[in-house]
Amino acid sequence: MKPRQKRFVFIAVAVAALSLAVGLVLYALKNNVSLYFTPTQVYNNEAPQGRSFRIGGLVEEGSVQREKDGLTVKFVITDKHKSIPVIYKGILPDLFKEGKGVVAQGKVEADGMMHAEEVLAKHDENYMPPEAADALKKGETANASAATSTPASAPATSAVK
Amino acid sequence: MAINWFKYSAPTNFYGLAGKMIPWFAFSAAVLFAIGLYIGFVVAPVDAQQGEFYRIIFIHVPSSILSMFLYLVMAGYAALGLIFNTRLSAMMATAIAPTGALFAFISLWTGALWGKPMWGAWWVWDARLTSELILLFLYLGYIALHASIDDPRRADRAAALLSIVGSVNVPIIYFSVKWWNTLHQGSSIKFTGTSMHIAMQQAMFTVLVACWLYAIAVVLARVRSIILERERNTTWIGELPEVRS
């Protein structure tokens, strides 16, 4: 082999070995790299006990309740399988909405509620003007009502979605 | 027709070629920036959820893409320099680093400005944000390491090694939103299509191309000064009209 071929092989092997090493480290630290736990993980006792951690999911539709003091908010974080109630006192970010993504940090107390110190909104990757969002919502509700009235068409509509 | 690909890998020939190309890239970058930002800030509609705040993506996304892409190009040139011992490759890698660092910084900065009103936090230690910060540090580390070694050839080799090792980080940034739970949203632009309104897409892609052309123009200008500096004792530089006058 010419010297430059040797150097090429050396660099290629080194990069491959390094990628493998980094890959294994990140795989081992999988749970530490993730920013939050899902409610299902919390129910499976994968989340840390007795100390602060983050839960992420969607704000359940119709679950947001504001207390009389105007600051305290109660809502439910769900991942469509399990859900966890959250109580938070403070200002919510602009994107906080029912049915949208949210990440709350705090401790789950004995009452089964997360007492959050911080609530962050998680945005999705869809960017569209309000008219398009309205049209999409109308389409979804139309689909949903069609699906409930004629159950046979349900697989077809979900495939289109 | 046989093209001599290696002709322009000699700094002597590349210096003149780069000088001729710079105005074209710089001019088209300026035009596309104007068009892209006009579409982005005037033509594109407001976002259904974020209102006007989303317009930061016309700067944020192109600079993030460029910061990752330029790193791979830099590491590629560094590897070429190590393997073939060509002088120009190492000079190109050195010329790319500051522009890449600039884009990484803009990406982090605009992201923080957007994050405060939208997420409720300037900064979160999630995988996407942290790996992009590491990218900025890799750029800064490359620049610092290269500057700290006096002999340029040795500096090239040491910095090349650092940049090649660091290139492992780029796929981590790209896939971080898929592999882990992050606060950062997933990619709107995927290989399979986009989830964006058409005018928003046009604005973003126009600014992306503009950033690209800008990066090429700036890197070529920088590599010309690096050539002048490193080859200052050669006769061909002494004969250049801009040096003689």
Image (cartoon, rainbow, N blue to C red):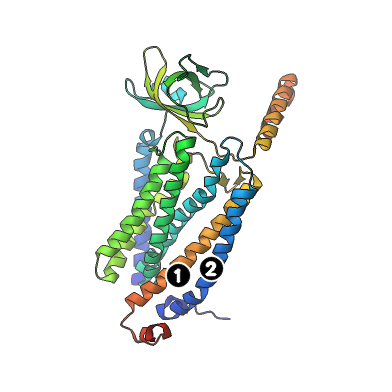
Q: In x, y percent, where is residue B86?
A: 37, 73
The answer to whether one can see residue B165 in this image is: no
Q: Is the C terminus of chain B in the top left, top right, bottom left or bottom right quadrant?
A: bottom left
Q: In x, y percent, where is residue B98?
A: 38, 60
For badge 1, the amino acid type reads: Leu
> Which residue does the image show at 33% across and 56% down from the upper left?
B140
Taking depth in this image into account, of B49 and B224 the one nearest to the observer is: B49
The answer to whether one can see residue A81 in this image is: yes
Residue B85 located left or right of residue A92: left
Dot 1 alpha-carbon crowd within 10 angstroms: few under 14, some 14 to 19, many 20 or more: many
Q: Secondary structure at mark 2?
A: helix
Q: How many marks?
A: 2
- Indicate the chain on which mark 1 is placed: B
Q: Which residue is labeled 2 in the image? A: B25
**Of pointers 1 and 2, the one earlier in the residue sequence:** 2
Q: Which mark is residue B220?
A: 1
